Amino acid sequence: MILSGKYDKKKALEQTLTLWNEIAENPQMNKFFALKALCMDTDMFCHCPICEYTVIVYGFDFSKGFLFADCEHCPVEWKEVNKVDSKRTQPCVKSYFGLWVDTYSKYMETKDEKLLNSLKLYAIRIASIMEDKLDELESNQK
């Protein structure tokens, strides 16, 4: 088991907020290219500062690409809104992030510009979740 200690909770939330604000401004971007545009580390688990903060790798198999985040330690309580795929177990994927992933996949397949508005709205919602969590973290530190 390897635990990543690259980020503390506050930094992970701040960087995730920055990431999703960038995606909201440029909804045609995926997380990798948004991180790159922000000159942030693209070599992190799931291209997500929160996952980088919480990730634990269990028997990483490079041939299959298995990796599992330690979702129990995720600092975000994700509201379940995406019930499309019951096989998904990660709380973030059952939330607005999962809706963003599904919509982004459709956008990449079709290049339908109408989907960009939904992508932007999901990114704004995810950024809002990060803002709320940062506010909560700061008020708990007072």
Image (tube, rainbow, N blue to C red):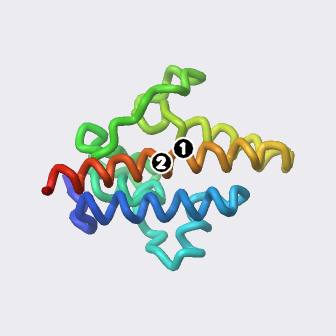
In this picture, residue 2 sits left or right of residue 111: left
Circle 1 crowding by C-alpha within 10 Å: few under 14, some 14–19, many from 20: some
| Residue at point 55%, 37% (across, down) | 98
Q: What is the three-letter code of the residue carrying label 1? A: Arg
Disc 1: which residue: 125
Dots 2 and 1: beta carbons under 8 Å? yes
Circle 2 crowding by C-alpha within 10 Å: few under 14, some 14–19, many from 20: some
**Residue 57 seen in the figure:** no
| Residue at point 26%, 68% (across, down) | 6
Task: Indicate the secondary structure of the residue bearing disc 2.
Answer: helix
The quarter of the displayed image where residue 5 is located: bottom left
User: Which quadrant would the C terminus be assigned to in this image?
Assistant: bottom left
**Residue 118 seen in the figure:** yes
Return the residue found at the far left: 142
Disc 2: which residue: 128
127 to 73, vertically: above or below: below
Q: What is the three-letter code of the residue carrying label 2? A: Ser
Q: Nearer the viewer, residue 84 or 132?
A: 132
Q: Nearer the viewer, residue 79 or 32?
A: 79
